[in-house]
Image (cartoon, rainbow, N blue to C red):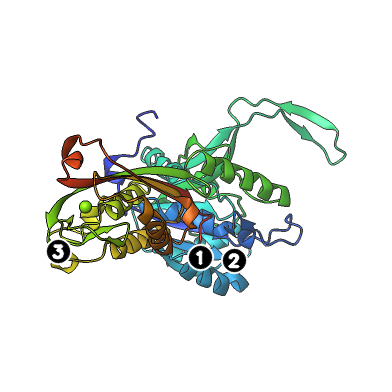
Amino acid sequence: MSPTQSPRPDSASGEAGAIIVAAGEGRRMQGIDKVAAPLLGKPLLAHTVAAFESCPAVDEIVVVVRPERVPWVEELAVACRWAKVRRIRAGGKRRQDSVEAGLRELTPHPWVVVHDGARPLVTPELIQQGLVAAQETGAAAAALPITDTVKRAGPDLLVEETVSRAGLWAIQTPQVFAYSLIWEAYQGAAEEVTDDASLVERQGGQVKLYPGAYDNIKVTTAQDLLWAELFLRRRSASGGGAGLMRVGIGYDVHALAPGRKLVLGGVDIPFPRGLAGHSDGDALAHAIVDALLGAAGLPDIGHYFPPEDPKYAGISSLVLLERTYREIKMGGWRIANIDATVVAQRPRLAHHVPQMKAALSRVLEVEPGCLGIKATTTEGLGFAGREEGIAAYAVALLVSEASSW
Ligand code: MG
């Protein structure tokens, strides 16, 4: 990334408001309403808004749609838990009427980002890069150099000339503007334009182009939807969405102490000593908790269940495991499998394993077959061999779900 593309520190948060326009009629979509068209299990518009929701520089979003779509988008906003969408507005006849309607709803911000609702593959990075590019002249538009040969032809489809591609760019959104610049451009903008930068240009403003993305397509035909799906699938396969897999590791040790119950994998095991600890000392459950948290990229067990917190005194570690599972489930993850090894010289644990699997699989909502639990001794070596304590290792594999907006 070149220095001009990296976000400036002062564009860190809350400096931009966004207008997402999706009020077009979709005449080329063969009767499909493109904003509502399903794309990997959620409506196209939800993908577009999600990119703005997760862009730190944007703290307010106005969505402009066709009047009859407003109640549907309001429901979508609740279902998707959009936090930044301030208003859902009915748009006008022309694109620019819709943007103007959005502009009137937006709280004045230093910067305004305008984006086509029908470009669901926009990324927070592309928005951020627009904000950086706009610093130069107050206006920026994502663009790509034209690669096809361009010809001008008459209504009879006879070529009149081949246009030189030099200096020609295909313009996308996001387009980013200083608030006062776009506001003024919209005052008395009578002529129809196809993008917002054109209005600024007409006012004599300078618009800076910055690199758009080849997958930032505008969905205007039913075929485009297939492309968008393909691009989204490719993106998730390379790290970001449904089908993504993550592995985590956990390790825990507790000391054996007299007068304690021995609990491993949620099962009470008859033994003269048990594992010392603030909770029930279930080292196996703790290792699994850390493997799950680690796979999801979350902080460790001590962060969620601080040992100094009295409410966890003597608590069953299955409760901690259940809360952990709830946390990762909320993050859109499901457990593919877990494998664990308990290291203990004594007692022999093998015949308790089926019970442990039953207890753990109930809490984790997986088939017992997705859980591997083995026990080993250390041939008398080390702290485990001396029966001073019991250790447990666990790995967990998580798979991200199709987003459950
Ligand atoms: Mg522990």
Disc count in the image? 3
**Residue 131 in the image, given as x and y percentages of width and height:** 39, 44
What residue is disc 3 on? 309
Q: Secondary structure at mark 3?
A: loop
Front-lying residue, 21 or 266:
266
Name the residue rendered at 49%, 47% in the picture.
Answer: 174
Q: Residues within 10 Å of mark 1 (few under 14, many from 20)?
A: many
Front-lying residue, 319 or 138:
319
Q: Amino acid at mark 1?
A: Ala
Judged by depth in the image, the label closer to the viewer, 2 or 3, is 3
**Residue 277 in the image, given as x and y percentages of width and height:** 15, 57
Asked which quadrant contains residue 234, the reply is top right
Q: Report the side of 337 relative to 15 (left or right).
A: right
Of the 4 image quadrants, the one containing the N terminus is top left
Q: Report the side of 284 relative to 254 (left or right).
A: right
Name the residue rendered at 53%, 64% in the picture.
Answer: 64
Q: Residues within 10 Å of mark 3 (few under 14, many from 20)?
A: few
Residue 191 appears in view: yes
**Residue 94 in the image, given as x and y percentages of width and height:** 62, 60
What residue is disc 2 on? 92
Q: Residues within 10 Å of mark 2 (few under 14, many from 20)?
A: some
**Residue 225 in the image, given as x and y percentages of width and height:** 67, 50
Q: Earlier in the sequence, mark 2 or mark 1?
A: 2
Q: CA distance from mark 1 to mark 3?
A: 52 Å
Q: Amino acid at mark 3?
A: Asp
Q: CA distance from mark 2 to mark 1?
A: 8 Å
In the displayed structure, would residue 310 be above or below residue 175? below
What residue is disc 1 on? 101
Q: CA distance from mark 2 to mark 3?
A: 56 Å
Q: Secondary structure at mark 1?
A: helix
Residue 299, numbered label = none
Name the residue rendered at 22%, 66% in the picture.
Answer: 315
